[in-house]
Amino acid sequence: MIRAHVLICGGTGCTSSGSLDIQAAFAENIEKAGLSEEVKVVQTGCFGLCALGPVVIVYPDGTFYSRVTTDDVKEIVEEHLLKGRIVERLVYNDTGDDNAEKANVNVSLNDTAFYKTQNRVVLRNCGVIDPEDIDEYIAMDGYAALGKVLTEMTPEDVIKCVTDSGLRGRGGGGFPTGRKWSLCAPNKAPQKYVVCNADEGDPGAFMDRSVLEGDPHCLIEAMTIAGYAIGATKGFVYVRAEYPIAVKRLQKAIDQAKEYGLLGKNIFDSGFDFDLEIRLGAGAFVCGEETALMTSIEGNRGEPRPRPPYPAVKGLYNSPTVENNVETFANIPQIILRGAEWFASMGTENSKGTKVFALGGNIEHTGLVEIPMGTTLREIIHEIGGGIPNGKKFKAAQTGGPSGGCIPADLIDTPVDYDNLTAIGCMMGSGGLIVMDEDSCMVDMAKFFLEFTVDESCGKCTPCRVGTKRLLELLDKITMGKGTIEDIDRLEELCNYIKQNSLCGLGQTAPNPVLATLKFFRDEYIAHVVDKKCPAGVCKDLVSFVIDQDKCIGCGMCARNCPADAITKTDYIAPGHKLPSYVIDAEKCVKCGVCMGNCKFKAIEKR
Amino acid sequence: MKTLAELQAIKEKMKNKVVLREGGEAIRVVVGMATCGISAGARPVLNTLVEEVNNSGLASKVTVSQTGCIGLCQYEPIVEIIEAGKEKVTYVKIDAEKAKRIVKEHLDGGKVVTEFTIANQNA
């Protein structure tokens, strides 16, 4: 009889930090301890606290071990699983109660600040079930929504339920899902399609990957429900080939569902057929745009096409198509089972439900969080995210990746939902949230995202292909200290032009990072062009490293470590010191900052 | 699979296996499993408890887990029953047979098996 489960995160984050070896070590040690009949090892999806991986949770007590190594496994097996003594040094505790561990009070995952304020709907099974076992999904009410839809509801009932829930597209645009379905449903055609956009391309966003890896059956169930609602019998999941674990698990899940008759002909004896296939994308950012994605599924080069006609009328293979994002679909089974009212009770007036954010950048707890719409940025960053490392100050957060904008520190109390973010010139985007501290340069940040869009522009339309390139050149000029005040106006003008004239979402949103930083951090742009200074000291051409001759004790540490041999000894001996001080040759200096990091006497300054 | 009943059957069968991972149980049963407990025979007690709890369909409200040395080594194997709002019950010198009675009478029946509790031992 199994009395304990050891859950090991098998998401991409923990896998790359070695969770597969840890799983093997657990299997071996449990066998050795003679516990094979009592303890079961389960590989699950992402728990969300990726920064603390590899993560291991032991149930029934729910003990949360973080940063586990293969060397720790023996101790966990012998102490915890055999003798019931929790290995305190590995337990993650951010409950603020330092005595909790010492008093052997169990610090369970759900008590941590990171999880306490979350509300996991989309991620409810991630880190709880084995994604490669359809039975575990069924145990968690899996496929019950599909059963309900096919036996009790008409397609109109399903669309009404989704419409009433207020669910909006989680891929970034925020279009009401129910409306999308109801626009497609009445169109008559020999074949209609359901497409899932799993081409998660925003730098820093990985919630779709985590759902695919942690709860793939949820997506299959939701797409089948969508197929029934709009009258489609065929579905495609377009997922990028850079997500090998997600692809493997989804394929396994599709095979299991087919074996159980939950995909295929005459599902639940209702006469409804649905078939699902995976299509791999090669990782072009533009393929996340819905029309480009469909062009790519058709086997052509991924380029967008003008709308209208909209996909609901003429989508994949010129047939009526509904395309939704992974996170949007992942909400559907719960909405069907628990009702539209339940879903609509979460969130704000026009943004219902929850949203998953991928926290990254200068933040303590890098990872995935799911919170009700309307949670403030302050709560997300300081309470759930654990704040900014090294006591630095929060400066801004970038939402929506290269299509979004930044939220400055004085708007940190903005409740995060679609409308509030749009109102301040940002966008929800797919949910990447990159946190920046006081040492970040906003011009440099805008430049970073522009470099990305210049690379990823498909080249079909001129405003995007040429416009973004010219934008980047202007930003380069500014960060090199060669900009003029007129360049800032030209920057703004060009941004607005690209926004209005590009063919698809990629170009239309590409200038957003520039526009948002111009709006909130214009003074930083001015500092770059007028004072020729980078206030954060990031733009290399605008900073110089200088040794304070009177603080330098002449140890020579800086000179020995300088990769450019730019530091030499002088003849000057400062009062009170025994050795001559050093000086940096600005001509030779490559501004790497190594000298500053090495100086124990804080004699080197960045100006 | 063609019917909802079949789906339900899989769910029922699997539920006991994953229920372990859902927190918020009403009753916690803790077995002392340090060296002293193990040498006094705590392992068969723990396994019996887990098995009996599952067999009596109590798995959704009872969690069986283990702990380290409780500090009363001469009374091992020790089993403690912790229920919110009630005083903790400590059973001592338990074996597999006694464990079965605890599940039947206390966990299922709601009646403390007083003859096994620590209060009834003559130290």
Image (cartoon, rainbow, N blue to C red):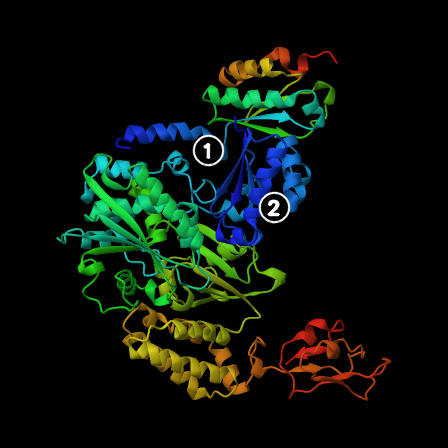
| Amino acid type of the residue that numbered disc 2 sits on in the rendered structure | Tyr
Instruction: Check the image and report above or below for A554 versus B55.
Output: below
**Quarter of the image holding residue B120?**
top right
> Foreground residue, A292 or B65?
A292
At label 1, counting other C-alpha atoms closer than 10 Å, the crowd grade (few under 14, some 14-19, many 20 or more) is: many
- Percent across and percent down for residue A218 are 36, 44
The residue indicated by pointer 2 is A92
The residue indicated by pointer 1 is B18
Q: Secondary structure at mark 2?
A: loop
At label 2, counting other C-alpha atoms closer than 10 Å, the crowd grade (few under 14, some 14-19, many 20 or more) is: some
Q: Secondary structure at mark 1?
A: helix
User: Numbered disc 2: what chain?
Assistant: A
**Quarter of the image holding residue A309?**
bottom left
Q: Give the residue drawn at x 22%, y 67%.
A: A307
Alpha-carbon span between mark 2 and mark 1: 23 Å
Q: Is residue A504 left or right of residue A32?
A: left
Q: Is residue A100 visible?
A: no
Foreground tag (2 vs 1): 1
**Quarter of the image holding residue A553?**
bottom right
Q: Is residue A47 left or right of residue A143?
A: right
- Percent across and percent down for residue A255 are 34, 43
> Foreground residue, A132 or A321?
A132
- Percent across and percent down for residue A316 are 22, 59
> Foreground residue, A198 or A402?
A198
User: Numbered disc 1: what chain?
Assistant: B
Q: Give the residue drawn at x 55%, y 26%.
A: B85
- Percent across and percent down for residue A154 are 19, 40
Q: Give the residue drawn at x 26%, y 30%.
A: B3
